């Protein structure tokens, strides 16, 4: 399984909003600041934010104090939410062969057990575990990790470090 660059950037962007906005509702972070801190091309970040907005994870506001903010608290948004918004179903990231059709477009009969039957069940089980893990990690957990590691927050007078 491999997460796309878009997904990895999206997780970093959501984390950045929660960490530097300190999870305060309505406190917006400007895309240019997020792009600078996270070393993400601004145009690409704007595309990512459009997908995150469609998924109901972030919202934007215009004006001098405008920018992006979390639509729900960081404790209510999971990595699974972000991955699904940017990369689609976690189950589809794994090869699930059971849905292959015969040459006529009809599903193959399930009566015959093959090695494919065995491995397909394995991939489904793995996908379930991965999905559950992604859903068990909230953005607030990442914020807590950042605090524990001593990651400086913007506006603290401490130098910012880039990942």
Image (tube, grey):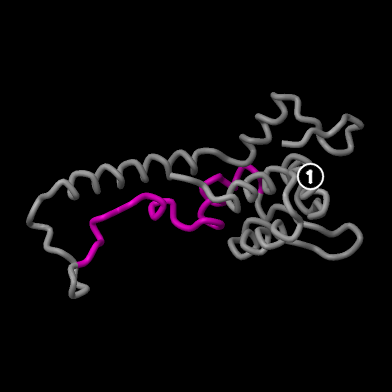
Residue shown at 39% from the left, 55% from the top = 92
- Foreground: 20 or 106? 106
Camera-nearest residue between 140 and 48? 48
Element on which disc 1 rests:
loop
Extreme left residue here? 111
The residue lying at 55 percent from left, 57 percent from top is: 85
Residue found at the far front of this picture: 103
Q: How many numbered marks have been drawn onto this rendered protein structure?
A: 1
Residue on which disc 1 sits: 21
Picture layout, residue 153 above or below residue 31 = above
Residue 4: where, in percent of width, then height? 54, 50
Is 157 situated left or right of 42 in this image?
right
Q: Give how far across and how far down residue 44 sits, in percent.
A: 69, 58
* Residue at left offset 92%, top offset 32%: 157
Residue 52 sits above or below residue 106 on the image: above
Image: magenta residue range: 73-101
Q: Is residue 52 above or below residue 105?
A: above
In the image: residue 75, left or right of residue 132: right
Mark 1 crowdedness (10 Å alpha carbons): few <14, some 14-19, many ≥20: some
């Amino acid at each position: 399984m491999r997460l796309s660059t878009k997904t990895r950037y999206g997780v970093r962007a959501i984390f950045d909003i929660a960490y530097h906005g300190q999870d305060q509702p309505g406190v917006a972070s400007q895309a240019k600041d997020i792009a600078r801190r996270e070393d993400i091309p601004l145009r690409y970040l704007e595309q990512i934010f459009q997908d995150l907005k469609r998924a109901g994870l972030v919202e934007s506001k215009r004006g001098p104090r405008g920018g992006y903010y979390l639509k729900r608290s960081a404790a209510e948004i999971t990595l699974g939410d972000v991955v699904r918004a940017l990369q689609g179903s976690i189950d589809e990231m794994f090869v699930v062969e059971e849905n292959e059709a015969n040459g006529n477009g009809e599903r193959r009969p399930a009566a015959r057990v093959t090695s494919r039957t065995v491995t397909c069940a394995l991939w489904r089980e793995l996908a379930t575990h991965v999905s559950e893990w992604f859903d068990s990690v909230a953005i607030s957990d990442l914020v807590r990790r950042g605090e524990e590691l001593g990651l400086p927050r913007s506006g603290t007078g401490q130098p910012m470090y880039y990942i």
